[in-house]
Image: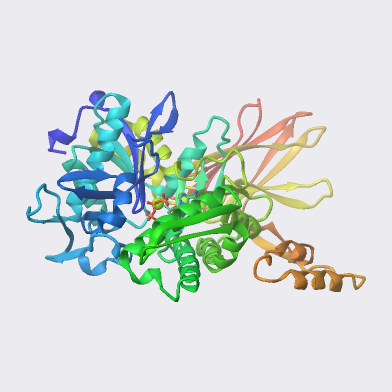
Amino acid sequence: MSDTKTAPAPGDRTVIGITFGNSNSSIAYTVDDKAEVIANEDGDRQIPTILSYVDGEEYYGQQAKAFLVRNSKNTVAYFRDFLGKDFKSIDPTHNHASVHPEDVDGSVSFTLKDKEGEDAAPSTLPVSEISTRYLRRLVNSASEYLGKKVTSAVVTIPTNFNDKQKAALIAAAAAANLEVLQLISEPIAAVLAYDARPEAEIKDKIVVVADLGGTRSDVTVVASRGGLYTILATAHDYDFAGAALDKVLIDHFAKDFAKRNQGIDPRENARSLAKLKFEAEATKRALSLSTNANFSIESLAEGLDFSSTINRLRYETIARSVFEGFNRLVESVIKKAGLDVLDVDEVILSGGTAHTPRIAANFGAIFPESTTILAPATTPTAINPSELQARGAALQASLIQEYEAEDIDQSTHAAVTTVPHITNAIGVLSVSQSGEEVFVPIVFPETAVPARRTVVVAAPKNGGDVLVKVVEGNTHIKVTQPQPKANGGDSKAAKVEDANSDEDSDFSDEEEEDEEEKREKVWKVGATLAEAAIRDVKKGGKVEVSINVNADLTVTVTAREVGAKGGVRGQLNA
Ligand code: ATP
Ligand code: MG
């Protein structure tokens, strides 16, 4: 980069990880290989992505959010997704209660009063400038916390950010005097945060990252193979996210208020609506922790106060259709990846909305027991879903901070973007106890290439010749229909369920469980790639098989007796 101001020498860098969301942002740093999310001056680790100006003074984060009620005309929120976009392609839905985006020569701007004085002229600021000002505040908070000037960061972005959006983000950061070391995708950052834990077992696995935010949900299927991450499929949704849950509560309590107050609908007044939104979000968060929450607003509309409560079950009932939307999103992306729920080893819940216990429980019901659901509600050791992306970004930043700027892309790109991968598994045929040939996978489907895996196959107890057959394999799902029940005991269970099915308590999926068909993943053997005979293996000897899948997808197989010289080696095209 020619702009020396934003490209410090590797040794002079102070690096952090940043997530810059439409709703919230976070900053994190790494110390002793451990990532920590930094609290800003207000003590917040989830910092609302909002700027507000009062009499020339700039507020950001939670303080700016509080101004959405009293100072909405000088408060700008939900702008991250507009960076690098044409005005005609943006969705301004979420900006109704703050400064509205405007079309200035086809790009997005906001007009607000950011200068002191009653009669100061308003400024029209492009979204890039708003972003720069906001990023500057984040960097300042991090610098203050660390006691030294932050120079550089790894910043997370959604998987569907295009080149123009990426360039706009890098430019906005540069204008805030921040070097972007690398942009990494949000789901990969979440996976990195989990894989960096000391107790993490780095093994080949399929991970679904469900990033449930405020204005969007992004679900990604990631194959983790030999430490490389490959994105297999993504889905993005702008209807099923935290804001939709806020709306459920807003509508619920607005109707209650109207019922108590001669039909006055507080949603019709902008300021009352802003108050409803603020309280709905607080109530929603409270319901993630406890089974009851208050909802109280002073002077909600026409000077009338409002106070009510809601329990979690009621909330889960009125929000059911939104929760079902999350389920469908996850199911659709797995299908898009050509996989089945049985293929998924881990589901990482990321983003603020992922704190919701019902969502984690619902995902638990979609996936088999063998799938780990990493969410606070289901796994006590889960990492805070709101911190995953910033932590992953901070870890990546500390990993690459010593690199020259121009080397970073080349050396780290492959780890976080789509690289060539095999579609079928490669493995060996082994003869089971019962004499059946069974497929033992060695290189799993969706492994990024080049890849190398080695396994040891058993030789006959008393030694002799061992035939190694390397084959392709693929999974299919075997479905076993349930056994019909012998007695009529079922009808009673059905009746009980019926009696319970008023709207507050009909989440009784469990009863159906033992009637469900059984689905399991089984290997199907495909083409034979290589056969090798290892002669005269010693008594108690072992045969080692190495499979190398080269970058051009050719496969090299080596089979040899452990500890013996020689071996058989062959190359073939898969
Ligand atoms: P987006 O870009 O989708 O707007 P984001 O990535 O900037 O969102 P996140 O912090 O991941 O923001 O998600 C914000 C959403 O999470 C908000 O709707 C917020 O109300 C919700 N949220 C935060 N904490 C909780 C909680 N404890 N329980 C339920 N929802 C929560
Ligand atoms: Mg997000």
Using residue 173 as the reference point, say whether residue 17 is left or right of it: right
| Displayed quadrant of residue 57 | top left
- Asked if residue 439 is positioned above or below residue 484 in the image, the reply reads above
Q: How is the image coloured?
A: rainbow
- In the image, 335 versus 141, the foreground residue is 141
Residue 86 place in picture, x, y as percent: 21, 64
Residue 474 shows up from this direction: no
- Asked if residue 5 is positioned above or below residue 265 in the image, the reply reads above
**Looking at the figure, which quarter contains the N terminus?**
top left
Residue 122 place in picture, x, y as percent: 11, 56
Residue 48 place in picture, x, y as percent: 34, 48
**Which residue is at 67% across, 64% downward?**
507
Residue 8 shows up from this direction: yes
**Which residue is at 49% across, 51% downward?**
285
Using residue 528 as the reference point, say whether residue 85 is left or right of it: left
**Which residue is at 76% across, 47% downward?**
431
- Asked if residue 32 is positioned above or below residue 531 in the image, the reply reads above
Using residue 568 as the reference point, say whether residue 505 is left or right of it: right
Counting labels gives 0
- Asked if residue 318 is positioned above or below residue 288 in the image, the reply reads below
Residue 256 place in picture, x, y as percent: 50, 69
Using residue 291 as the reference point, say whether residue 103 is left or right of it: left
- In the image, 204 versus 87, the foreground residue is 87
Farthest-out residue, bottom: 263
